[in-house]
Amino acid sequence: MLYLPQYYLFNRNKKYKTNTIMRKNALFLFVLFVGFTAFAQKTIPNLTLKNLQGKSVSLTELSKDKTLVFSFWATWCGPCVNELDAIAEQYEDLQDEKGFELIAVSVDDSRTKARVKPLVNGKDWDYQVLLDTNQEFKRKMNISTVPFVMIVKNGKIVYSHSGYTPGSEEELVEKFVEFKK
C-alpha cells in the first residue's frame, strides 16, 4: 500500500473540487451566453450611407415599414458578383410579383470604391447601391465575410446567410416571401 502524506491527499481533493466548480461555472456561463445570443433580435443600426450619386441614405428610414434584402458585396469578390447577377436576371419580375427589393451594400474600401459605379453600370443592375467604404455597417452587423445577405422586416433582421452557391438565390426569394407575409 502506498502511503501519501496527509497534506497531499487534502490538496488533491481540494484541487478536484475546485476544478469541478470551475467547470460547472464555465458551463453555466456558456449556456447563459448562448441563450442570450440566440434570443437577441438584431436591428438595423442608425447609420447613414452614401448611394452612387453621393446622396445620404438613412438605413433606419430605408427599412421602416418594409421587408427588404441587404446584400453585402465587393467588386473583388467573384461569388458576390455572381449572386447579384443571378438575382438581376429575375429582379424585375420579383419586384412586380413579390414586392422584392434588394439593397446592394458595397464594402469596397477607399482604394477600390472607384470600381463600384463602373461595375454596376456595366452590369446594368437595377438595385439601389449603397457604399460602406469604412465598413461601419458591416462591422456593426458582425459580418466577417462577403457575400452576405440578410432579410430585414420593419428594421429587424429576420434571416441572414453567408456565402453563395448557384441556386441559393431561390432560397433567398422563398425566405423573403415567407417573411413578407
Image (tube, grey):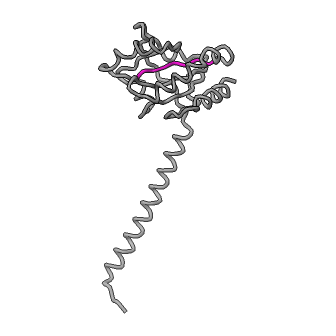
Magenta span contains residue 9: no
Residue at the outermost bottom position = 1
Image check: 1 left or right of 156? left
Residue at 65% over, 29% down? 174
Q: Quadrant of residue 76?
A: top left
Give how far across and how far down residue 172 sits, in percent. 60, 29
Q: Is residue 55 above or below residue 6?
A: above
Query: How many discs appear?
Result: 0
Query: Viewer-proximal residue, 63 or 41?
Result: 63
Residue at 50% over, 34% down? 162
The quadrant of the picture occupied by the C terminus is top right
Residue 55 visible to the viewer = yes
Residue 61 visible to the viewer = no
Query: Viewer-proximal residue, 45 or 90?
Result: 90
Q: Quadrant of residue 109?
A: top left
Q: Magenta region, mostly helix, strand or loop?
A: strand
Give how far across and how far down residue 130 sits, in percent. 44, 16
Q: Which span of residues is magenta-colored?
A: 100-106
Image check: 119 left or right of 62? left
Give how far across and how far down residue 73 sits, in percent. 44, 25
